[in-house]
Amino acid sequence: MYINVIGKSKQVRYLSGQIIAPLGYVRHRIPLQISNDINKYTIEGRKSIHKTIHHINTNILKHLMEHPNPKASIEYNDNLLSLYSAQKGKCRICRKELELEEIYCHHIIPKEIGGTDEYKNLIIIHIDIHKLIHSTNDDEVTKTITKLNLDAEQIEKINKLRKKLLLKSI
């Protein structure tokens, strides 16, 4: 016996747990508008996929692929590549396009307190932003904020990350 949560009609009929009658009670979803030419199995389809990543520095991406962090897990290294692509090679906080030596993959929740190498727990940030997130020296914090020319919104993002580390706001 199914409970009719939509209305009080006694005419509601189910098939495999889905309402099939009356039609006014049938729920549906609108399919996503995905282009038919995007297809990883054809040359044209792969070109369509790759034309969306033209804004990424492929030399940096290639270097990250060829030089994974040997001390990190495979999941971390894979997610680093995915994040770099998803963030279009930019810092999540300051939105600056990052050079290879400026890239830092930060754990939102540190591994020491139960964080993982999952995609949702990592962000790509500028290495100076990373130092700022962990810094406890007020002079260093002020100097770095001035150097990076951070605005109030960016500082608020940093403070959210500092809060996860149980550090005071800057």
Image: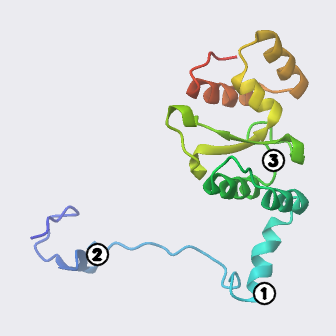
Q: Position of residue 162 (x, y in %)?
A: 63, 25
Q: What amino acid type should be assigned to the residue bearing mark 2?
A: Gly
Secondary structure found at label 2: helix
Residue marked by disc 3? 90
Determine the secondary structure under disc 3: loop
Q: Position of residue 152 (x, y in %)?
A: 74, 24
Q: Position of residue 60 (x, y in %)?
A: 87, 56
For label 2, the crowd category at 10 Å Cα-Cα, with few meaning under 14, some 14 to 19 and many 20 or more, is few
Q: Find disc 2 in the rendering and name its residue.
A: 24
Residue at which label 1 appears: 44
Q: Which of disc 1 and disc 3 is earlier in sequence? A: 1
Q: Are marks 2 and 1 in contact (CB under 8 Å)?
A: no
Residue 109 visible in the picture:
no
The quarter of the image holding the N terminus is bottom left
Residue at mark 2 to residue at mark 1: CA–CA distance: 42 Å
Identify the mark nearer the N-term, 3 or 2. Answer: 2
